[in-house]
Image (cartoon, rainbow, N blue to C red):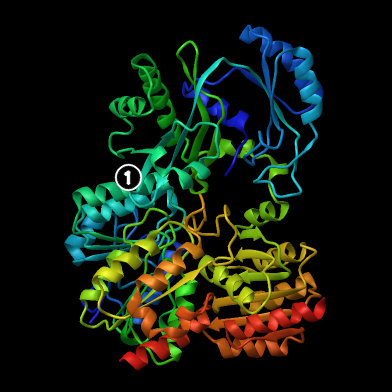
Amino acid sequence: MKIHEYQGKQLLQKYGVPVPFGIAATSVEEALAAIPKVQETAGTPGVMVKAQIHAGGRGQGGGVKFSKDKAAAEANVKAIFGMQLVTPQTGPEGKKVQRLLIEQGLAIEKEFYLGMLLDRTTARVTVMASTEGGMDIEEVAAKHPEKILKHAIDPATGWQDWQSRILAKQLGMSSKVGNELAKFLRTLTRAYDELDCSLLEINPMITTKDGKVMALDAKVNFDDNAMFRHKDFEALVDPSEEDPRETEAKKWDLSYIALSGNIGCMVNGAGLAMSTMDIINFYGGLAANFLDVGGGATTEKVTAAFKIITSDPDVKAIFVNIFGGIMKCDTIAAVREVGLKLPLVVRLEGTNVELGKKMLAESGLDIVAAADMADGAQKVVAAAKGAR
Amino acid sequence: MSVLVGFNTRLVVQGMSGAAGAFHAKQMVEYGTNVVAGVTPGKGGTKVEGLEKVPMYDTVAEAVEHAGANTSVIYVPPPFAADSILEAAAAGIGVIICITEGIPARDMIKVNYVLKLQYKNTVLIGPNCPGVITPGQCKVGIMPGYIHKPGGVGVVSRSGTLTYEVVGQLTKLGLGQSTAIGIGGDPVKGTDFIDAITWFNEDPGTSAIFMIGEIGGDSEERAAAFIKANVKKPVAAFIGGQTAPPGKRMGHAGAIISGGKGGAADKKPRCATRTSRSRRRRPRWARRSRASSDEVGEAYESGFRRSG
């Protein structure tokens, strides 16, 4: 689960992580009203206007601007709010800016990259840091892997101050700033743990001219599996950032991801669902979605899955690939319920597979039965081409 | 003739009074698995419908003491699953198989740490996995038993239904399995490919190994390097998710291409070229830039049959 920068900063602030003073706004009026308040609280005229969308690379797309005074800030608010912000992560169509963060401008001495995430190989949460702050860190990782410093967190003790001291030396910080870094990381690592984060990225983390360490940006992602411990995070979801079909799928405990092709897929199991996409591709088609109905699917769940798949106007044919044999009746009932008009190829494997095939054949529905996965993939690719 | 589970397995089912636990316990008994006990806190001394012969206990320690359990399978909901794994380890269970899907990474980091530190001889399979089956002997998990067939292929997989697909195709080709291990789709897990491949490599009942991987992480890449250095038996590999877009979690918490890493394109060349033995013996799979799971079966046939 992803949240906005301003929400991330509010959460981190509760743990004592130093962040610039800022006010979030959901309209131009709110944003304009926030400018003098930020200037007054900070005691300086400089103001940052930052577009709040989930995608990264906002600065490159013109969604983050420094304004030296009130007039410039007002002009930037009007320019950025409502713009279709295109960044390397939004895709060419961009993302409409509907929220802004108005923040104090700071006298930056140096910018650093700081990230925390799970390293699967060591099964430890790992702190990554680099002097190449503010840059695209993936580019740094590719070109200069030696410039990314990594320190693992011991699950028994948590992050320790001595690790911060080593890191401060590696980053070329003074003794005094090193102590500030230790304070900063003490709070940040605690936040990562207690909030059940899956990613915490501060890019840039800055040192100010008066020797402070601050989080100038905050990218906070949560572990979806831990949401039962954080019911309050539901309020942080911005529906405009979510694909409506993915949101609907979540309600039914379906795992759905929209893709760019025209063949709708319904599969049980994530690995088989991915391989189904692959095999459709192999036979010259393109999947319109990834959809894992999971185990123990009911008629209601399968019906919801069909509705979600068919709500994508690009879908020209549907491939149901089920290994497990628990869904024969449900599939038929769901097809009736939805009144499916598109070509449907069904491959069922599992207990009583013959009975299932007989039921499909006698259902009177226009269903193409497939002998196996490859057969089904070829048939659905042909059906999608015929429908076009 | 097998690894992890077999005729010697004495199974305790943690969470047996729950819907999933009860359903799969019955299926396992039907398959012939020696289910000796069930555990649900607060349900000690009660009976589970359809499993009246299996005694219920409050703790795994009692199941070990009174029923002689040596293996556990966990169907406990995510908030309580980490506790269940550690309870089994503390009770002296040797093989813990955790089916539960959706355990927070924070919990699993701690579990994994404690197991590696204090219970070095305990094996954890999973979580978020279909379980382990030695066909004809013992089924521990949720996989459909009838698609399996006793034989010599050791199967190890990060996926559930994709494993069934592959096993089903192997069986149709007449290639039985020594043991099929689902290691699970989570980023932090007890057993990785290298562990399972090591067991299969040493198992006299296993003559060939099939590894089923998917996008995300670098387990497959590391396994490929290990196979090249250590494994003498033929190995075939399949990677799911070749058409998956970056940055999207494909169902499994572990299946995500991030930071430009973990894509099928990263895994395939390594699996194809480093496992030189399997490349030589599976010309069709290695030659193609894209392999489908249907071809995996054919690859197996053309490769192992000829070599064997």
Horizontally, residue B212 falls left or right of residue A66, namely left
Horizontally, residue B158 falls left or right of residue A32, namely left
Horizontally, residue B41 falls left or right of residue A288, namely left
Q: In terms of depth relative to the viewer, which is nearer, A67 or B173? A: A67
A346 over A167 or under it: above or below: below
Horizontal and vertical percent for residue A150?
36, 39
Horizontal and vertical percent for residue A223?
50, 45
Chain letter, disc 1 residue: B
Horizontal and vertical percent for residue A271?
51, 68
Q: Residue at x 76, y 71 (%)?
A: A337
Q: In terms of depth relative to the viewer, which is nearer, A110 or B2? A: A110
The residue where tag 1 is placed is: B110
The C terminus of chain A, quarter of image = bottom right
Residue farthest toward the front in the current orientation of the protein: A143
Q: Residue at x 61, y 70 (%)?
A: A277
Q: Secondary structure at mark 1?
A: helix
Total count of labels = 1
Q: Kindly tell me whether residue B180 is visible in this rendering.
A: no
Horizontally, residue A128 falls left or right of residue B251, namely left
The N terminus of chain A, quarter of image = top right
Q: Residue at x 26, y 56 (%)?
A: B88
Quadrant hosting residue B305: bottom left
Q: In terms of depth relative to the viewer, which is nearer, A368 or A277? A: A277
Kind of residue sitting beneath label 1: Lys
Q: Kindly tell me whether residue A184 is visible in this rendering.
A: yes
Horizontal and vertical percent for residue B201?
24, 75
Q: Residue at x 72, y 51 (%)?
A: A244
Q: In terms of depth relative to the viewer, which is nearer, A243 or B25? A: A243
Q: Residues within 10 Å of mark 1 (few under 14, many from 20)?
A: some
